[in-house]
Amino acid sequence: MHHEILLDLTVPIAAWYRSVTAEPRDDDPWPTFREFCLERSTSIRHTIATQTTQTNEIGRCAVLLPVLKIVADEVGPLSLLDVGTSAGLNLNLDRYSYRYQPGGGLDPADGISSAILPCKTNAETPVPAAIPIISGRRGLDQSPVNVRDPAQARWLQACVWPEKPERFTRLAAALEISREHPPPVFAGDAIDDVAAHAREAAREGIQSS
């Protein structure tokens, strides 16, 4: 349903979607919803039959960053391998800005990013003092998403819960960053192919260090 709405933002049911409007309607959407589903039944059935859920929430980078910085402090620059990576947006974690509360903010070397990730912390959280250096990066996914393909990028957006506009905004920023800095993402299976890609990731890290 969300996908159909993103294809045509003028449809009446869009008025209830927070991802589309800042002031969504809060009355009963059922009559409009039903009519829309009947009108678009062929397209909706096709989507259900041909698509699988693809999510790429970059907010998790704020949780991973402290651990990655601890590892980087021990071993040096990191080479990342993200399995089940979708579009590989999390591989660009060093190109995002972070706002730890409390703990302060971290920005990439070239300044504040368009993707700003908030994260609540406590006294036990090892908030990093800097973003670790990433020397290599690659992703592995059964069905990689090409961020430069508008239809594939739209499907990523459709898989975001429409009542979470902050996630929608983060995704839009991450897509723009990844179009400029596309991470290498390969089609493959986590069981059969991860070992070979882990070896390649290790070599890339050594070569880039």
Image: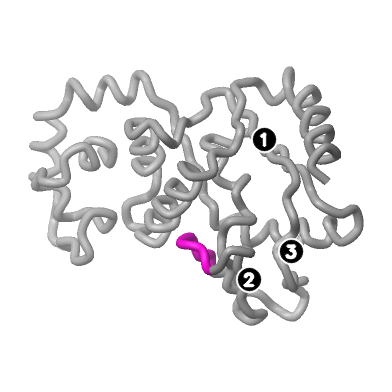
For label 2, the SS is strand
**Image quadrant occupied by the N terminus:** top left
Q: Tell me which label, 3 or 1, sits earlier in the chain.
A: 3
The image quadrant that residue 42 belongs to is: top left
Identify the mark at residue 66; answer none if there is no mark.
3
For label 1, the SS is strand
**What span is in magenta?**
112-117
What's the residue at 77%, 71% (across, down)?
126
x then y, percent, for residue 105: 61, 75
Check disc 2: other Cα within 10 Å, few if <14, some if 14-19, many if 20+: many
Q: Is residue 27 left or right of residue 7?
A: left
Q: Name the residue that disc number 2 marks.
A: 106
Helix, strand or loop for the magenta stretch, by majority: loop
Q: Is residue 119 left or right of residue 199?
A: left
Q: Name the residue that disc number 1 marks.
A: 138
For label 3, the SS is helix
Of residues 189 and 93, the one nearer the viewer is 93
Any magenta on residue 137?
A: no
